[in-house]
Image (cartoon, helix red, strand yellow):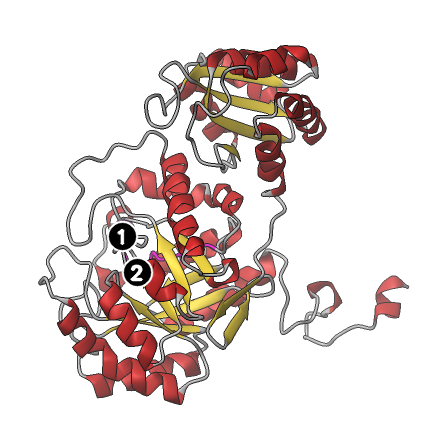
């Protein structure tokens, strides 16, 4: 395809958009796809027509130089796909000032034909297309944390929240005493928790500011005691490298950083050992609302942030199989943006890391239902079940026993296994049917 090859000439290397500037859009229904197209500048009538004409996959290209974009639109139309172009949300933010965003609707075969044509440009977009298409069938594997491992391709992980704080929004003060915290941690394991997440500094906007020394004083004894008494990994919820270094020495094997490795030393602290890390997206800083709520595109910005920060972790020595990601529900998002993230969880699969969702009893649920934190159990259950159905691999929860049951039922519904036994071989009474019998 000489048109595309010519279009790329003189453009290669002019954009600094991350690798994942092409992703499969995975909205919950056609209405959301229509909304995406309208936001791109397509009329409602044309958007509705294009959704009816399109089939198979919807790919978004961000920040494409205009001549190349025009070539892509022409080539995709030539192979029978539906292409829409509009001003890029990323103009001046890693993309040329006249860049375009594209939303393409077509079959997998049509996209593979486009990727073949893009290969002639030498700009790497063909690889991005292939990676985006592969994300629709990507599955999480084993997440490793020190000596521990969870096979997230076979089960949903449940992370129990253990706040050793006086001022967390839901259970502040309940487990501030170290002995009570250890007792609760042991109970969580009995209830089925796969990971215990110990936190000593509440992100609650009304919580007092503390330093690393106080944070270590709170969580250190609990981490030390639990790591010696339970067979599950102990995580610590901290954004301070000093705290991370201390708790890793005490037996923690996962750092859950709600600021996405904002501390310049955090990545190297984790990279020096064999601990895992959860990298979360945040807009702004903990304990306060951001100065601005602006996103160019919500999922696009989250993906760019997480790509940059996970690259930082890998460059510091953290292996890919020790990394999971969290889109950061409520951390710098409006309620409508949070709800959109839940619907679009599959779009995060393009990054290739297990996804953790932390929404337990949050104010987002309270605002939707008009309920206080102590009354949000059912809302939390709905959010977690929906998140698992949309592709989440770990849920972070206060109510471990209830949410373990939610996870086990949800993972069965999405086609995982019950105790390692394929669902299709289980009778309703739980008895395993022989393969020969199922084939007969």
Q: In x, y percent, where is residue 178?
A: 21, 84
Instruction: Please name the residue shown 40% across and 55% down the image.
Output: 313
* Residue at image location 17% in from the left, 70% down from the top: 172
Label number found at residue 266: 2
Tell me, yes or no, whether the highlighted magenta stretch contains residue 209.
no
Is 363 a magenta residue? yes
Which structural element holds mark 1?
loop
Location of residue 253 in the rendering, given as x and y in whole percent from the top left corner: 40, 73
Q: Which residues are magenta?
A: 355-364
Query: How many residues crowd around disc 1 within 10 Å: few (fewer than 14), some, or many (20 or more)?
Result: some
Above or below for 217 versus 113? below
Q: Main secondary structure of the magenta part?
A: loop
Q: Residue at x 70, y 17 (%)?
A: 79
Left or right for 172, reference 398: left
As drawn, is 70 to the left or to the right of 236? Answer: right
- Reading the image, the residue beneath label 1 is 262
Callout 2: SS: helix
Q: Does 25 sit above or below residue 159? A: above
Residue 96, image quadrant: top left
- Mark 2 nearby-residue class (10 Å; few <14, some 14–19, many ≥20): many
Quarter of the figure with the N terminus: top right
| Residue 49 visible in the current orientation | no
Name the one closer to the observer, 218 or 433: 218
Are discs 2 and 1 less than 8 Å apart at CB? yes
When the figure is inspected, residue 229 is found, relative to residue 58, above or below; the finding is below
| Res. 435 in view | yes
Q: Is residue 222 left or right of residue 79?
A: left
């Amino acid at each position: 395809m000489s048109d595309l090859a010519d279009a790329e000439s003189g453009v290669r290397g002019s954009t600094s958009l991350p690798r994942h500037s092409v992703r499969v859009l995975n909205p919950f229904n056609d209405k959301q796809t229509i909304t995406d197209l309208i936001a791109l500048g397509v009329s409602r009538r044309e958007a509705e027509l294009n959704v009816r004409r399109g089939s198979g996959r919807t790919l978004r290209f961000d920040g494409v130089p205009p001549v190349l974009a025009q070539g892509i639109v022409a080539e995709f139309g030539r192979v029978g796909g539906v292409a829409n172009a509009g001003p890029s949300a990323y103009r001046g933010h890693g993309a040329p000032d006249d860049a375009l965003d594209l939303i393409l609707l077509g079959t997998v075969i049509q996209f593979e034909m486009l990727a073949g044509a893009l290969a002639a440009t030498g700009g790497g977009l063909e690889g991005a297309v292939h990676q985006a298409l592969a994300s629709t069938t990507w599955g999480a594997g084993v997440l490793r944390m020190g000596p521990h491992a969870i096979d997230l391709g076979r089960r949903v992980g449940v992370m129990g929240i253990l706040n050793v704080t006086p001022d967390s929004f839901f259970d502040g003060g309940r487990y501030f005493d170290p002995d009570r915290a250890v007792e609760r941690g042991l109970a969580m394991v009995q209830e089925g928790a796969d990971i215990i997440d110990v936190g000593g500094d509440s992100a609650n906007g009304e919580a007092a500011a503390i330093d690393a020394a106080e944070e270590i004083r709170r969580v250190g004894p609990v981490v030390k005691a639990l790591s010696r008494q339970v067979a599950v990994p102990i995580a610590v919820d901290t954004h301070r490298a000093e705290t991370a270094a201390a708790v890793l020495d005490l037996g923690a094997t996962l750092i859950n950083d709600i600021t996405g490795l904002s501390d310049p030393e955090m990545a190297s602290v984790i990279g020096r050992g064999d601990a895992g890390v959860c990298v979360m997206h945040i807009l702004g800083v903990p304990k306060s609302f951001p100065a601005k709520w602006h996103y160019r595109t919500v999922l696009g910005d989250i993906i760019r942030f997480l790509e940059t920060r996970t690259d930082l972790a890998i460059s510091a020595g953290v292996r890919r199989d020790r990394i999971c990601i969290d889109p950061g529900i409520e951390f710098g998002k409006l309620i409508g943006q949070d709800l959109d993230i839940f619907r679009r969880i599959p779009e995060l699969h393009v990054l290739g890391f297990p996804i953790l969702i932390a929404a337990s009893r949050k104010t987002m649920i309270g605002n939707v239902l008009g309920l206080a934190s102590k009354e949000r159990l059912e809302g939390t259950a709905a959010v977690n079940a929906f998140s698992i159905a949309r592709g989440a691999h770990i849920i972070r929860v206060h109510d471990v026993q209830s949410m373990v049951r939610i996870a086990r039922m949800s993972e069965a519904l999405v086609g995982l296994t019950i105790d390692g036994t394929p669902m299709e071989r289980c009778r309703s009474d739980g008895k395993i049917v022989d393969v020969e019998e199922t084939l007969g």
